[in-house]
Amino acid sequence: MTKVEESRGDAVAKPVLTLPSPHNEDWHWSRLNALEALSGEEHGQFPLPNQSSFWSGLTGPKLLFVDGVYQAEASHAGPVKVEAVTEKSQNPLGKMTNGQIGWTLNLEETCAEPIEILYLGSGGAYHMPSSIRLAKNVSATLVETYAGQGWSNRFSYFDLGENARLQRLARLSCEGGFTSLIEEGSLGEKACLITDWIGNKGADSRIDQRFDLNASGAELMSGGAFLAREKQRHDIMIITRHIAEGCQSRQKLRALADDQSTVSLAVRTEVASSAQKSDGEQSLKGLLLSRDATVNMKPELEIYADDVKCAHGAAVGELDPQALFYLESRGIDPEEAKDLLIQSFVMEAFISKPDSLLYSTWLHDTEHWAGEK
Amino acid sequence: MSKLLEIRNLRAEVDNKQILKGLNLEIGAGEIHAIMGPNGAGKSTLSYVLSGKPGYTVTDGSALFMGKNLFDMEPHERAAAGLFLGFQYPVEIAGVSNLHFLRAAANAQRKTRGEDEISAGEFIKIASKEAKALGINPEMLKRPVNVGFSGGEKKRNEMMQMAVLQPKLAILDETDSGLDIDALRIVSESINRVMRQPDRSVLLITHYQRLLDHVKPDFVHVLAKGQIVRSGGPELALELEREGYGELVA
Ligand SMILES: Nc1ncnc2c1ncn2[C@@H]1O[C@H](COP(=O)(O)OP(=O)(O)OP(=O)(O)O)[C@@H](O)[C@H]1O
Ligand SMILES: [Mg+2]
């Protein structure tokens, strides 16, 4: 277990919460009042999970944060710097990270090895910003893992130069508490940001990704699988505005809800009149594993340009009994058959290239969820 | 000869509709039986009842498989005991690769029987060999189960599963329909190779004599209105081909 450093500055004193309430949020979002309780709690209420199972075993840069505090002795940061982040968020949750210490990555050259960042929580809250800047033609791979307990409130800013490419995996693997990810930034010409989120454990979550595609040919690919059980909630919102010509955006989200859990997916794509030759695809699917579970979906397309290719699909269903029987008739027991179908369902949401570390990690996480039931 | 399957007075319904109405059938080890019969007679229903498909309710009668009550077993346990159903309409399963599925099936059966699992490497060898024998492109092993497969490819895929799983009793529901002439020959060869053995049996459900030219049945039965209404040797199929079901279904 990693020792929690006690050297926290005044900057992390408890912030005053001004969170949105259902009055000023317009959809099926979970109430954020629980966060007030979480933010008032002390760190150290829960033992930290064993970190070793969360690292890939590769030799790239690795950073460990415990309750938002950098653990230098357990990290080798490579090109990543732990410092204040200048970019600010206007998002109500994102704002809480403004001015806090976080990390920055400023790459002038391609980083061949994946950069891994592990955030462990022992209870209580932390608010941490980060900023990634990739210069022209630079590519990088990033794996961020949230584990343990408490409220992890993270603001990520992305600035990708022309033709830069970032592939990232965000693993929401906290056993309890809340994980909020606020993601914003700017993509240069033909820059590509690929994100795969996976929520496979017990924490509630909120993801808020907003990008304006201001440079032609930029690509924003966002995939996610959110697996919820008991009274868990995942709220995902992606707003993409196509402003320049020839940009691509894709959102592939899969929601899997068991027990009395709720997953809400809201995806909004706007195509401005200037954004000819835009290519947008929204694919939302939900799978209900119990009668009391809920999947909310809100796919929205607002198109003001005439020469565009936009598709959207949304569907909620149950496990296919024909497929279950087919598997069982070959000797696979009902639980394993169910797990196989669940995996095949969430697999579609994985966007990064299937031969990467991201894929095997992602696969491991989906198996893990299925296997636990 | 000892009986592999003994069905006595089987009555079964689906959606409260009686489909099987007192069906009797015995299949001995090493025998190949063919069931023919008009559309809607209950042939597929029989195959589903024997393999345990949910929604099919046995209301009377019994089925013993190698001396054990089939209806006391879950579908996966029946498979592990050696029952295989070749589906009339194989199911597509997006996102699960053929190879992964097959290995999961083979290992699940082994586990249920208390045997050791097959390693991934060893399994690929077995599956590739069987794929080759059936003229299945090895690339198809990587594709999701039956997704985008042609009708004939799906049937070949069923036969590949049978070859890998090595069942004691294969119920093949219209495995011949949708096969081109060459595929029919290839599939028949694999049925003969895998299943023509002293301790194995086949129940072929078919509408056509041409399959029976390749896989020669020892017995032929006519299923009509939920019962076996006539049984005979291979000559019965030829007679039906010439004369139709006529009186048998009246
Ligand atoms: N879910 C169901 N509800 C009501 N009737 C059903 C249901 N499923 C099957 N049946 C009926 O049961 C009867 C037998 O069907 P089955 O599929 O067993 O016929 P079959 O002998 O295999 O026919 P075919 O040669 O066309 O394949 C048919 O009349 C069919 O309509
Ligand atoms: Mg049929």
Image (spheres, rainbow, N blue to C red):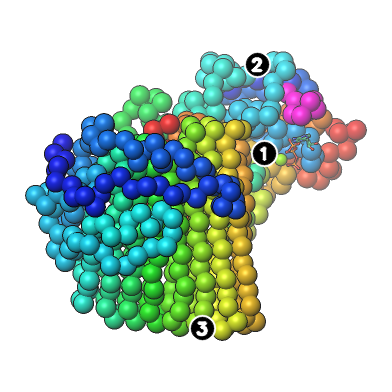
Q: Are marks 1 and 2 in contact (CB under 8 Å)?
A: no
| Quarter location, residue B65 | top right
Residue at 68% from the left image edge and 29% from the top image edge: B55
Relative to B65, is B87 above or below?
below
**B29 sits to left or right of A64:** right
For the residues carrying marks 3 and 1, which lies nearer the camera in this image? 3
Magenta span covers which residues?
A: B12-19
Q: Is residue B34 visible?
A: yes
Q: Regarding ligand 1, which quadrant of the image does it lie in?
A: top right
**A338 sits to left or right of A183:** right
The residue pinned by badge 2 equals: B62
Q: Residue A74 in the image: x percent, y percent?
A: 12, 48
Q: Residue B110 in the image: x percent, y percent?
A: 38, 30
The residue pinned by badge 1 equals: B205
The residue pinned by badge 3 equals: A245
For the residues carrying marks 1 and 2, which lies nearer the camera in this image? 2
Residue type at the position of mark 2: Ser
